[in-house]
Image (cartoon, rainbow, N blue to C red):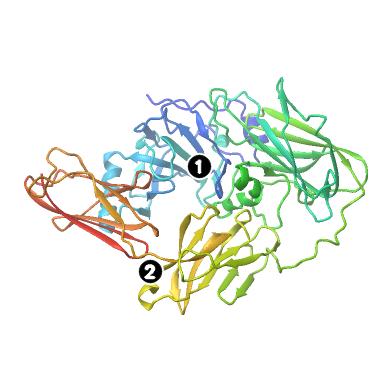
Amino acid sequence: MKKIIALVINVGFCVLVNAQVNYPQNYFQSPLDTEIVLSGNFGEIRPNHFHAGFDIKTGNREGLKVYAVADGYVSRIKISPYGYGKALYITHPNGYTSVYGHLKSFPEQIDKFIRAMQVSKQSFELDTLLNATALVIKKGDVIAYSGNTGGSQGPHLHFEIRETLSEKPVNPYLFGYKVNDNQAPRITQIAVYPLSSDATVNGKNNIKKITPVYANGKHTVKPIDSITVSGNIGFGIDCYDSETNSTNKNSVYSIELQSGGKRIYYCEYEKFSFENARYVNAHIDYFQYKKANLKLQKCYLSKNNKIELYKGVIDNGIIDFNDGAIHWITFIVKDFYGNTSELALKVKGNKKALSDKQNKIKESIFDCNKPNTFIKNDIEILFPAFALYDDLQFNYSSSVKATTPYAPLHHLQNTNIPLQKAITLKIKTSNLPDSLQNKACIVSVNEKGKINYEGGNYKDGWIICETKFFGSYTLSIDVIAPKIYPQFKKDANGIVNLRGLKYISFKVSDNLSGIRKYNLFIDNKWMLMEYEPKKQLLFYEIENDISKGLHTMIIEVTDDKGNSEKQEYKFER
């Protein structure tokens, strides 16, 4: 018998209070037999995105049965070495789609269907949409086995529920899924931000961070952390929630900021759209995240912030303190079950402010809501509208220190400023031979000198690519083919003995542009290999129809700049 998740008893609280939509209850069952314990939940801050579902623990095991949570049909199959790895999407007749990621394998019917498509496309990677009759699914059917594929950092099941038409992920809690959680969220840090050049916090135009004291279930601020402010001020908070039987630091459900008992800002993790998920970089203090991995969620809004999580925000959450009075700022943080933590901060307004005379604008100001262009002799940068979150005083410099003689090192702003949309980066070549034009690329160079491939193609003396990050960029070339290291040995006659073996595997690596294509042929027939980037491993499960005797095997691996390595072997089966 499959064990169904216990549903939330207090439906009125969890569905009617926490969300405006009456989400269906008692419709979806659990995707696993095990008790639901979460290593990650909806809305968590992840690199460049919000987490879109539940990460359900599998006891550090792979191969657990994964069940369809309701009747429907497989509407999408996506197989990739990255992201969700092996993933299934099931569309249900009630207007929602369930998603299952990081899967290890599939039952026979689905596995044969997927393999047939991979073979027809001659590609392990797959992203295909299916009609409603191709793979019909019943509630409780075993649709897969849990795994650790793609970008997973350990065995678990990634589970989502999306609106079918909008494809917006919705918090699974809202459908009645319940975990054991009677613990209130924890507040680990708050921050006070001066948001204009004449604003001050304790007399300075700098952020002030405060670590609360936690004792007897309450959060307080030490007397030494007194705050005097003037001008436009914003606040931020770092917080997390944990389940009763878990130590994982997961997302809270809502964050509220009050001033004098009046709500100024409210954020609730109900649902969002994937096209806006990258706005997480506007939602957090990106500088502190990059500098110290501190996930300070700003309780005020950037000029360009299109996240759907906010409700009833007044004046973008920004408070003007210029009255000389005492104000009580209160943070209220809740998990889905209503467990609540509060923190009150006494703030004194000050009519005095810094003079703005010293803040002369030396560089161009880019309006974040409009297209912007930066042009120098050997570099051009095109910013589409809404690429930036706030207006930016753009800074640029260059240095002759570079990895190759083909361009200087161009310094674009700094890596602590995020971008929402990709900018077009054009770098002019110098001394680049015609024979290397198709091997040239743009690379980024971090503070430690590490080089990372960014891509790009040659056109009329320029290398052009798109990037979503500021930093230091220059040109390089990639003329070195990937390396292939077979995980088997040849005998004295040069023959590989594969009798009795289930897999053929190869370690692979590339020096710069990364592996783009890989093919395996046995007796001139294309064979399906899987790629596991975390282990730098290509492997092939030997099919039963390969007859006994001597065979020829050819493997070829190609990087993103077209450099290829090919190896040929004779093997005996």
Quadrant in which residue 391 is drawn: bottom right
Question: Is the residue 236 above or below the residue 459 in the image?
Answer: above
Quadrant in which residue 202 is drawn: top right
In depth, the one of 320 and 181 nearer the eye is: 320
Q: Is residue 536 left or right of residue 555?
A: right
Q: Which residue is mark 1?
A: 161
Q: Amino acid at mark 2?
A: Lys
Q: Which residue is mark 2?
A: 439
Q: Residue at x 57, y 23 (%)?
A: 244
How many numbered dots are placed on residues in this image? Answer: 2
Q: Position of residue 96 (x, y in %)?
A: 50, 44
Quadrant in which residue 347 is drawn: top right
Q: Amino acid at mark 1?
A: Ile
In depth, the one of 146 and 230 nearer the eye is: 230
Between discs 1 and 2, the one toward the N terminus:
1
Residue farthest top in this picture? 216
Where is the N terminus found, in terms of image quarters? top left
**Which mark lies nearer to you, 1 or 2?**
2
Q: Residue at x 44, y 76 (%)?
A: 431
Q: Position of residue 11 (x, y in %)?
A: 61, 30
Question: Can residue 384 be seen in the rendering of this structure?
Answer: no
Q: Residue at x 23, y 59 (%)?
A: 566
Sort mark 1 into few (<14), some (14-19) or many (20+) by Cα contacts within 10 Å: many
